Amino acid sequence: MTDLNELMKQAQKMQEQFKQAQKDLTNLVVEGQSGAGLVAIQLNGRYDVISVSLDDSALTAGKEFVEDLLGAAFNDAVRKLEDERGQAMNAMAGGFKLPEGFNFRF
């Protein structure tokens, strides 16, 4: 029966670690850039836009150019956030071999 109790303790510990990881990821802030820094967008772990920064020179280039830069900066931030989330979950999973593309739903 000791093995079952130990397994339950490990499961409870892992659950607490996942809860902490969720909290940490929600507080995470990443920055995506485009146009060699002409546009920068910050996202938090919930994919909320925290800030948008535009270099003044980008505003003279025309609407479509700015729209493209904004989209590219947002996509860059999303990729960085996904990378951070993936690294955090891989660290949590430790030695467990998870299938490629496996995504924890938070």
Image (cartoon, rainbow, N blue to C red):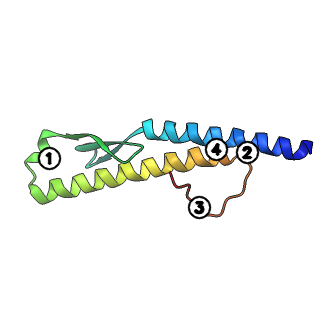
Compare marks 3 and 2 and give the one earlier in the sequence: 2
State left or right for residue 102 relative to residue 106: right
State left or right for residue 18 relative to residue 84: right
Between label 1 and label 2, give the one nearer the viewer: 2
Give the class, few, some or many, for how many residues have Cα within 10 Å of label 1's Cα (few <14, many ≥20): some
Compare marks 1 and 3 and give the one earlier in the sequence: 1
Q: Position of residue 9 (x, y in %)?
A: 77, 39
Which quarter of the picture shows residue 75?
bottom left
Q: Which amino acid does label 3 sit on?
A: Phe
Give the class, few, some or many, for how many residues have Cα within 10 Å of label 2's Cα (few <14, many ≥20): few
State left or right for residue 18 relative to residue 97: left
Q: Position of residue 96 (x, y in %)?
A: 73, 53
Residues at marks 4 and 3, CA–CA distance in whole angstroms? 14 Å
Residues at marks 4 and 1, CA–CA distance in whole angstroms? 39 Å
Give the class, few, some or many, for how many residues have Cα within 10 Å of label 4's Cα (few <14, many ≥20): few
Compare marks 4 and 1 and give the one earlier in the sequence: 1
Between label 2 and label 4, give the one nearer the viewer: 2
Q: What residue type is labelled 2?
A: Ala
Residues at marks 2 and 4, CA–CA distance in whole angstroms? 16 Å
Q: Where is residue 42 in the image (x, y as percent from the top left)?
A: 32, 41
Residues at marks 3 and 2, CA–CA distance in whole angstroms? 19 Å
Q: Which amino acid does label 1 sit on?
A: Ala
Q: Residue 91 carries which label?
A: 4
Between label 3 and label 2, give the one nearer the viewer: 2
> Secondary structure beneath disc 4?
helix
Residue in front for this viewpoint, 59 or 91: 91
Q: Name the residue under label 3.
A: 102
> Secondary structure beneath disc 2?
helix
Residues at marks 1 and 2, CA–CA distance in whole angstroms? 52 Å
Q: Name the residue under label 1.
A: 58
Q: What residue do we see at 70% from left, 38% from top?
A: 13
Compare marks 4 and 3 and give the one earlier in the sequence: 4
